[in-house]
Image (spheres, rainbow, N blue to C red):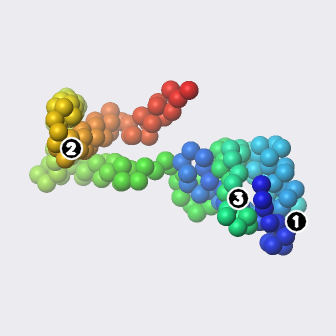
Amino acid sequence: MNIDIKSAHGLIPAIIQDSETKNVLMLGYMNEESIQKTIETGKVTFFSRSKQRLWTKGEESGNFLNLVDIKNDCDGDTLLIQAQPVGPTCHTGADTCWQTPNNANYGFISELEETIESRKENADLEHSYVASLFAKGINKIAQKVGEEAVEVVIEAKDANDNLFLDESADLLFHYLILLQAKGYKIDDVIKVLKSRQK
């Protein structure tokens, strides 16, 4: 690993990222000794500027950061450390030092799930298709997923890619509604898929 410790007065910034959610958990500083200890123990260890000593995250609280991977940037003066947090990362008890939850985020899919949840909670049956589906119950929602699945299969056999993608979007949308009707989210399905990975 090509790390230029000297250029940073013996310390190098280390960005800590959750290896699963990819959220940034904290920023710390490391020296050669703390990097070596991190690699040897598998527990992320910093050089504490306030304590002027090595400090293993979690040494007092038990909220360790278990090392998964270390990468250095193109200039060799910043580390990206992927870790699995054991408990909250911040000393305040928050998941991250930015006081944000360390939840998995799937971009637009997560935004869509939030919209579905909001429409379900607001229950504006007159103006919301989603709310009206939830009001009709699980059987109607499951039926819609079945209908959309059949339409995807039909369009897959034809040559119109636009219709295939439109129907695929309808299927995914209704499947996200069905998941919430059952009390789940896409992250629950992804966890099952990951558990099957060999």
How far across and down, in percent of the image, does residue 179 sit? Answer: 32, 36
Q: Which numbered disc covers residue 161?
A: 2
Residue 41 visible here: yes
Residue at disc 1, secondary structure: loop
Quadrant in the rendering for residue 15:
bottom right
Q: Which residue is mark 3?
A: 72
Q: Indicate the quadrant containing the N terminus: top left, top right, bottom left or bottom right.
A: bottom right
Amino acid marked by disc 2: Asp
Q: Residue at x 58, y 63 (%)?
A: 98
Residue at disc 3, secondary structure: strand
**Proximity of marks 1 and 3: CB atoms separated by less than 8 Å:** no
Q: Residue at x 32, y 51 (%)?
A: 112
Q: Which of the marked residues, 2 or 3, is nearer the chain's N terminus?
A: 3
Q: Residue at x 78, y 61 (%)?
A: 3
Residue 177 visible here: no
Q: Nearer the viewer, residue 125 or 170?
A: 170
**Proximity of marks 2 and 3: CB atoms separated by less than 8 Å:** no
Q: Which of the marked residues, 1 or 3, is nearer the chain's N terminus?
A: 1
